[in-house]
Image: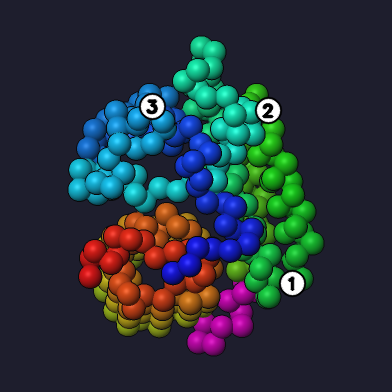
Amino acid sequence: MQEPSGALADLRGDCANCFGLCCVALPFSASADFAVDKAAGTPCRNLREDHRCGIHARLRDTGFTGCTVYDCFGAGQKVSQVTFGGEDWRTGPAGRVRRMSEVFPVVRQLHELLWYLTEALSLPAARPLRADLRELLETTETLTRGTPDDLAALDVAAHRQQVNVLLLRTSELARAGVRGRGRNRRGADLMGARLRGADLRGADLRGAYLIAADLTGADLRGADLIGADLRDTDLTDADLTDAFFLTQPQVNAARGSAGTRLPGSVTRPAHWTAQG
């Protein structure tokens, strides 16, 4: 599948222009997703001097599946090249790695909001809200360009709530026109649910727990998937055409097949092919 085009393409990680921030700033604990413990602000043991991963081709085989799921929405290059002006944490003054580690998660959240707002603006049904969506997108983009001090002090939760109100209205408009509109399953506990072949067209699945659910052959056209937990969800031959607010990390965390139909905003993970 081809890479996303347009504005969304700019909200994808560009490791060549990042100082390996996701491998430094973020903490993780030994689990099914990570082979070892790592504290925030501490470089991963697999990070090379050139900011590349030394086991990138073997991440899933060596216990670092979590790394293959993650995407920074372009926050890594923004913090590296804009917030800190291209100055490497390795060669910068003492305390820079700590400051970058504080700022990176903030910008990552803002970039995720930019992803949703950009997609909302592209939905024909959202036409009545486009002026408000565009204003919030511009405000959010301005916030991402703040100083390290501005970003560290930002109340991201409050801004996210403001954006969420508008995204909810967008979702209602977009799903209203879906034939056979699915019922409201917002935040539902569907862990391990057997939903093979289910008709979920236009369903509200915001924040639903679909961990290890069987959605083989399910129809999710026009569904709202914002925040849905798709870890180990079986999307084999499922139809997600025109599903919206779906992100690459969600898709990366799921299982799928060559027959899984995805919206153009995301790409088919390489490990899906390996799964057959």
Among the two numbered marks 2 and 1 on one chain, the one whose residue lies closer to the N terminus: 1
Kindly identify the residue that appears in the image at 45 percent across and 57 percent down: 248
In the rendered structure, which segment of residues is drawn in magenta? Answer: 172-182
Position of the N terminus, as image quadrant, is bottom left
Position of the C terminus, as image quadrant, is bottom left
- Number of other residues with Cα within 10 Å of mark 3, as a class: few under 14, some 14 to 19, many 20 or more: few
- Height in image: 165 above or below 32? below
Among the two numbered marks 2 and 3 on one chain, the one whose residue lies closer to the N terminus: 3
Tell me the element at label 3.
Answer: loop
- Height in image: 269 above or below 90? below
Q: CA distance from mark 2 to mark 1?
A: 33 Å
Q: Which residue is the site of mark 2? A: 147
- The answer to which quarter of the image holds residue 199 is bottom left
Does 259 lie within the magenta span? no
Q: CA distance from mark 2 to mark 3?
A: 27 Å
State which mark lies toward you, 2 or 1: 2
Kindly identify the residue that appears in the image at 52 percent across and 24 percent down: 88
State which mark lies toward you, 1 or 3: 3
Q: Which residue is the site of mark 1? A: 127
- Number of other residues with Cα within 10 Å of mark 1, as a class: few under 14, some 14 to 19, many 20 or more: some
Q: How is the image coloured?
A: rainbow
- Height in image: 126 above or below 150? below
State which mark lies toward you, 2 or 3: 3
Residue 109 visible, this angle:
no
Q: Residue 113: give x, y in percent of width and height.
A: 60, 51
Q: Which residue is the site of mark 3? A: 49
